[in-house]
Image: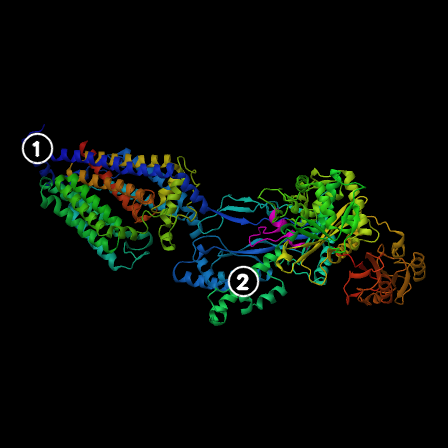
Amino acid sequence: MGANQKLRRRTVWLLIIILALGFGAVITRLAYLQLVQGEELQRRAIEQQLSDTPISAKRGTIYDTKGKILAQSASVWRVVMAPAYFDDGADGDAQRAFVASRLASILGLDEAELLEDTKQNTYYVSVKRRIESAEKEQIIELQNELSEKYHKSGIISLLDDYKRYYPYSDLASSVIGFTGSDDQGLWGVEYQYNDYLAGTPGRIISAQNGIQTEMPFDYNQNIGAIDGSSLVLTIDETVQSIVEKYMKQGVVDNEVLERGVCIVMNVNTGEILAMASVNGFDLNDPFTILPDQKKEIEAIDLEYLIKNDYFEEDEDPYKISDAKKKELIERAQNEAESAALARNWRNKAISDTYYPGSVFKMVTLSMALQEGVVNSSSRFGCSGAFQLYEDTIHCHNTAGHGTQTYQECLWNSCNPGFIQIGQLVGKTKFWEYYQAFGFSDKTGIDLPGESEDQFFVHDGIEGNMLDTDLAVASFGQNFSITPIQMITAASAVANGGKIVQPHVVKQIIDNEGNVVKNASTETKRQVISESVSKEMCGIMEENCATGSGKNGYVAGYRIGGKTGTSEKKVDANKNGVEDDYIASFCGFAPANNPQYAALVFFDEPVGGNYYGSAVAAPVFASIMSEVLPYLEVVAQYTDEEASNIDTATGAYTGMSVEDAMAAAERDGFSVTVKGEGSTVVSQNPATGTSIPTGGTIVLYTDESSTAETATVPNLIGFSVSEVNSIAASYGLNVSVTGTVSASDSTSVSQSVPEGTEVAPGTVITVTFSSGGIAD
Amino acid sequence: MLTIENTSRRRVRDYERERHAPSKKAGGRRKINFSLLNIGKGIDMPFVFLIFILLAIGITMMFSASYPVAYYEIGDSYYYLKRQLIFALVGLVVMIAVSFVDYHYYHRFAAVILGISYFALMLVLILPSQEGDVHRWIGVGMFGIQASEISKFAIILFMAHWGSRYYDRMDTFKFGVLPGAAVFLSTALLLLFEPHYSCIVIIGILTVVMMYVSGIKLKWLAIGAAILAVLILLLWVTGMLTYAMERMDGWGQALNEDLDRDMWNATWQTRNSLYAIGSGGLFGLGLGQSRQKYLYLPEPQNDFIFAIVCEELGLIGAVIILLIFALLVWRGVIISLRARDRFGKLLGIGLTCHIGLQVVLNILVITDWLPNTGISLPFFSYGGSSLLTLMFEMGVILAVSRTSNIEKS
């Protein structure tokens, strides 16, 4: 073979190898990358080419029913970091250390953790959310320093952010709830309606080159944040404030250990106008416990540890090391703090279950009337106790109520009477009605944390009662229910027999102002007839006028209601353990056409009296005396009340002093003039305020005179006439409410606390109550 | 079937021709008219045509790939284009000029040029280092040249010279294997100090290719391959290979999402190259539409330019360009085989092979099948010295075609 031929042949082989093997491999590889892996590679390319900056959506506002803002998001800033921009090597380390230490000092964060963050190889690390403008200024300063010192920009940026703000701090705290660090609802309607409130965060997607400035061609995509929808609650701030004011007072006055609950509900629509668990917590600072709680926790010592079983059985608490003791105390403090927080947040109105006690008698009587098992000729005897097999069930009146009609049973709140009524209803029917009134199901109120009832049954079968169970159940002691279930049932008793759906959100409005959802009245079922309801209203009105509920009476209003005192431990007396009580009152107004129901509930009052009539009813009366006029429920005074009747003040401002004095006196007020001027520049009380006839009107004739104040005296513990004369001597007006017609009426609360400086002529509401009712 | 007599007679004739080549070529050169009208005379027009096409596409793509970098880093989008155009023009002039030079001159000076290449390799080692702590360049900026460029040409030239001079003794170990191995190993040793590993690979392959075409016994190639295989196996068994692969700047690791910062940075260029290639898909994003060239892919105008080509023109564009390269290689081989003498054939094949090798290795690098070690893409990558060297080599191939065609006529 010739050399040239060999060369030629080998060259051809070479050509084949280069073209087939080399180019073939290359093309295969490219095809694989571009066709098979293409999508994934393109995705990753786009990921780095597009800068994706989240835009926070503004959380929706929460309004009360009148449009007052209960929760609102305000603009603040979020600090983010792009650690990928740090240089490599020693320069980068210096930059990282600098940034970490500065951020730590400005934002109060942990420097070591920040330093770890700076080592990430990403363009987006959220450093801190919700910084205020003072911190923002310092961050901007830091940005400038970075660019001057290291010629670095883009490492630290500020993004828009929002902070939740609650103008009324602790008002309706367990209903409104609060949000967490990521603006997510954690409790209350903030949690329940989080999906509506949160909105949709937006993104700015822009094409950027390798040094993160924008690309020259248009590649920007702005997906705007959709702000959250707003909620209009059924809660009325004014009603809620009134409720909380009296409930707080009630908790203090009665030394209530386990907080108080009040619900005000529209009986016809199920709208909750107020729902309070006092004391609540500061919505703007939900993770801080109350000062008293803090003091208690700080006081935790060895005795506390021993009492609360922090030691093993074989441990001698007095011989442990200091370190161990310190550790245990810390643990106990942490646990106590968590427990305190949980306690403050707890919405007792829907989360707690309790024995409704005598309040439930209105339900038992409704059943009996609906079933027709009682009539005007029915009589129920009470000897002070009721013997059922080997059990003796006592009445609160140990002397006995004698022979009673069914109405009298309720007015007397007589347990033996209701045992007999319950027996007439029968176990099967009782259980059916119990379910029908909605006690066996959650009400489904639009709030988180609702509890289920507990009905103590035998054999583990629902509704399977023994005779003794029925006996105790008929006066509300065999099952525990939530306050919201009780007021829903009471509303049905009052509203013509309809179980309505209680709810706290009236309307959802999107960020453009369109109504997304309207809560309509939802009637679940008719549980008793209208005529039975009407009769019940009459019986309960009479109960408040002359019966066991008279401390719940509000002058000028037709109130129907029922007291309740329930034991927290059913078998307490048997075991020789001191029982704890819940004092409650549930009522509605006006009795001839019920509109609003309210339930007042104090858990463990230890201030001497624990009866619902003494503890809860006066608070109910105080609340209703302010709430009903506000809600424009027309007052109808009895003749007896005429002397205390209130008159609306006229408009005297702008008149000459002489004319104004004449006009005010013509309206039936006594007049005090302050100042030297000739024209009335302002008056107190303001035009349209209801004050008792003969009350004092103060007319101011110059601005300087308005600075004068009067000190509110103690008005508690007096009779009606005494209160009126004390108030008059201080130049103040009094509006009386509660049981004023009884001979032993004494004032139990005043709307403005003693010692407060107020303008002369200010109206102070004083609630009266009558003693001697043990229920 | 040729008889032994025939074969030996042809050998003698070839040998005689080789020996008298210088004087004969002097006569041949006289036949070449330097008039501009005769520029095209004798040279292989398809080959020239392919060069122009590649140059045109290459410069266009180089401009497309480079203008964002030029804009952001230099402030003049046309910075690289203007320079590359000048290089291309100078390169064309060089190519044409060289195509008139009788390639037999190189035959005579093969050993001298090899000596120069050794000198250059040693010179760079004592010259100051460049970016990345490597010693590769002689001179600076526009007037710089990589010593290894000289080496590659010198070795091809020397191997062609040796293979044509001792063509009848190439089947011996002493003539066929030893000189090539010695030249390669000595050059490789010097390149090891630069260091410039990719060039060692190219020179190694080129040496083997030249030996093979020159006619050494296949058993030596097989033995060489076996030694290489044993060596690699040894490295693999001792764990050195894994270590070396790890050291090779994260070769094959580019798409790994879980890299530490240093590794991430080391694989940055390859990763972004893969992103660019993948983004192109079948049809590409369109000319000028690359996004990866916006400072993601560092130095997109240099070694990784083909990634941008793939991104903008897609697989179809990439394959078409590769086909043009393939045609160029094919045509180069045709020219070489048509050369009248063995030296011309070997020289042409070596240079053609160099281009093909360069293209294949470049794309294997940008697709992460080879470690990222700086192999430029002929006609596409920006750079004065590499383009001028390339055009010079094209000129030599054209000179081979011109000489053989004129001699034929």
| Mark 1 lies on residue | B7
What's the mark number on residue A334?
2
Q: Is residue A181 magenta?
A: yes
- Vertical comparison of B25 with A131: above or below: above
Query: Is B119 placed above or below B368 here?
Result: below
- Identified by mark 1, the residue type is Thr
Q: Are marks 2 and 1 in contact (CB under 8 Å)?
A: no
- Marks 2, 1: nearer the viewer: 2
Discs 2, 1: same chain: no
Q: On residue A314, which mark appears?
A: none
Residue A740 visible in the shown view: yes
Could you say whether the residue bearing mark 2 is in a helix, strand or loop? Answer: helix
Amino acid of disc 2: Asn
Quarter of the image for residue A366 reads top right
Badge 1 sits on which subunit? B
SS majority, magenta: loop
Q: Does A569 sit left or right of A37 as displayed?
A: right
Figure colour scheme: rainbow
* Chain containing the residue with disc 2: A
Q: Is residue B241 magenta?
A: no
Label 1 environment density (alpha carbons within 10 Å; few <14, some 14–19, many ≥20):
some
